[in-house]
Amino acid sequence: MRYWLFKTEPDDYGINDLVQAAATPVPWDGIRNFQARNLLRDEVKKGDLAFIYHSSCKQIGVAGIAEVASDGYPDPDQFDAHSPYYDERAKQDDPRWFRVDVVLRAKFAEVIPLKVIKSDPRLTNMTLLRQGRLSIQPVTHDEYAVIVELAHD
DNA sequence: GCCAACGTTGGC
DNA sequence: GCCAACGTTGGC
């Protein structure tokens, strides 16, 4: 079982949308970056846990935890000419983009601000701080535990 | 809205 | 296969 951090812009899709979906798995789609794609295709597995991170918004930070509800599978939007995520280079037998399904595990009482994460010496090696722009990123077990602890303070 | 970081594309 | 140009991300 592994840990991840999934970024999203909450104005577009955020923790409250996951709350609304309740126990129904929702696709985590629209990932169009090769490094993130490789993780979704090869590494992220059903049963893993992922922090939901809100970016480009008023309250930037970790908003909660989701459980990964499927292994990676091709994102069908890449084949849909009417979708903004359409990719003419993608072939049915050779998909370029993948997604997983997720289900809400916990919404934190307060978003853990990026500022707090940056200022915690135990988190200085987080991928979030080292490679800020990656939309799907690994989290170590220790980092996971620290963030959960911060959420319960 | 600015701009730094950095991933992707495309010409050579 | 290099690298300049370009586009996007995302914090501030």
Image (spheres, coloured by chain):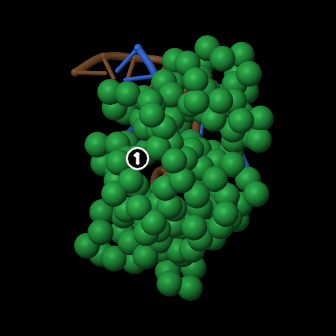
Chain colours: A green, B brown, C blue
Q: Position of residue A138 (x, y in %)?
A: 68, 45
Locate residue B8, reporting x and y percent.
51, 52
Residue plotted at (75% across, 40% down):
A140
Q: Is residue A21 above or below residue A76?
A: above
Q: Please provide percent x and percent y for residue C1.
A: 73, 49
Kindly identify the residue that appears in the image at 59 percent across and 50 percent down: A50
Which image quadrant is residue A37 in? bottom right
In the figure, residue A132 lies in which quadrant? top right
Mark 1 crowdedness (10 Å alpha carbons): few <14, some 14-19, many ≥20: many
Question: In the rendered view of the protein, which quadrant contains the C terminus of chain A?
Answer: top right
Give the side of residue A64 with respect to residue A37, left or right. left
Q: Secondary structure at mark 1?
A: helix
**From the image, which quarter does the N terminus of chain A lie in?**
bottom right
Image spot of residue A74 (x, y percent): 53, 74
Question: Which residue is disc 1 drawn over?
Answer: A15
Kindly tell me whether residue A102 is visible in this rendering. Answer: yes
Most extreme residue toward the bottom is: A93
Q: Is residue A61 above or below residue B4?
A: below
| Residue closest to the eye, A151 or B6 | A151
